[in-house]
Image: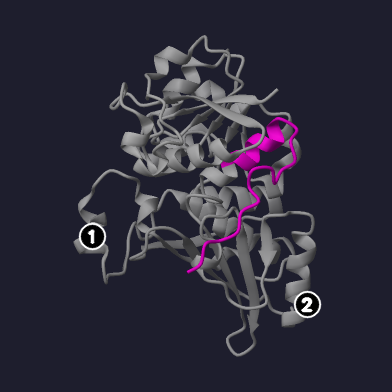
Amino acid sequence: MKIRTAIIGATGFTGSELARLITLHPSMTLEAITSESSKGVKFSAVHPHFFGLVDQKLISATEIDDSGLDLVFLALPHGVSMNYVKKWKDADFKIVDLSGDYRLADPETYEKWYQKEHIFKEAFSSFVYGLPEFFSEEIKSARMVANPGCYPTSAILGAYPIIKEGLVESDRLVIDSKSGATGAGIKAKSGTLYSQVNENFNAYAIGNHRHTIEIEQILGGKTKRSPTVQFTPHLLPTDRGILSTIYGGIKNGVKISNEELITIYKITYSGHPFVRIREEAPGIKEVRGTNYCDLYPTVDPRTGNIIVISTIDNLMKGAAGQAVHNANLMFGLKETEGLDLISLKP
């Protein structure tokens, strides 16, 4: 029997990617797609590339209460998902939340970094952080999973081995990340208009981006260290993809070669099908449309730094692909099911 799924808030980029993956997934069916602003409209009218493939009408989320679903994806903005988690706290179906409402350790930290009041704090203890490379066993038994942020996914996977092994000074880790414009969502904003993004490149949220604390908390919890991260995001004049460059100063007394560093990364991610350790620096087109995270670690003996390049597709490994990966684990499926995708290049 197939897993009956619904997407709550499917008119954005992430909702569109989820619909694509679920439609092609051999063990899932897309039973309901919701939108409060476009209910009654065909999904393919909102996302024309689904014409003739996903033509079902968008409905209100209130209509799925008793629909016999197995799994619900919350593809909603931060501050909105928590309302649906509260509404469905006792529902029979499982939930994968793609917002930031339950990614952090506690509601107080959430309110500080997201500048929003959290209205359902009781659910924090019920959520598992959905980074399969770190928490696969917990995800398998979870009813509710908090899908990681796109920037944190690239940063955490890239930085974890060098912090865990004590190779770098973790109190001065620099993470310089660049994302395509889809990371800002589908709604028009002055900063993501074509005339602003085209032939342009800029940093934003310098020193206070809300993903900083997510990176620090997960890295700290997994390595039992207390990393301090200087995280700076940038907007690329591209539609999708994230490239993070991670700089760590090698600790005094530590001597490591490129070959030894690459071996550490290969051992760390052995058995994890969506992390590829590359032999040359990857570009974002090499992971486009896939659930891969490509990592390239290298030693710079002149400056005494380790540099790690990490690339993902922000809509896939950074959102919808990782959400489906989590769902596969939650339902006992092969973790790569429905995600055996090859990048489209050029």
Point out residue 73 in the picture as x, y percentages from the top left corner.
Answer: 52, 31
| Picture disc at residue 194 | 1
Q: Where is mark 2, residue-wise?
A: 260
Evaluate whether residue 256 shows in this view. Answer: no
Crowdedness of circle 2 by 10 Å Cα count: few (<14), some, many (20+)?
A: few
Q: Please name which of the two marks, 2 or 1, marks the residue nearer to the observer.
A: 1
Which portion, as a residue range, is magenta? 323-346
Q: Mark 2: which amino acid?
A: Glu
| Picture disc at residue 297 | none
SS at circle 2: helix
Type of secondary structure dominating the magenta stretch: loop
In the figure, 25 relative to 94: above or below? below
Q: Is residue 169 left or right of residue 210?
A: right
Q: Depth check: give the residue in front, 271 or 169.
A: 271
Cα distance between the residues tagged 2 and 1? 44 Å
Which residue is found at the position 34% from the left and 41% from the top? 48
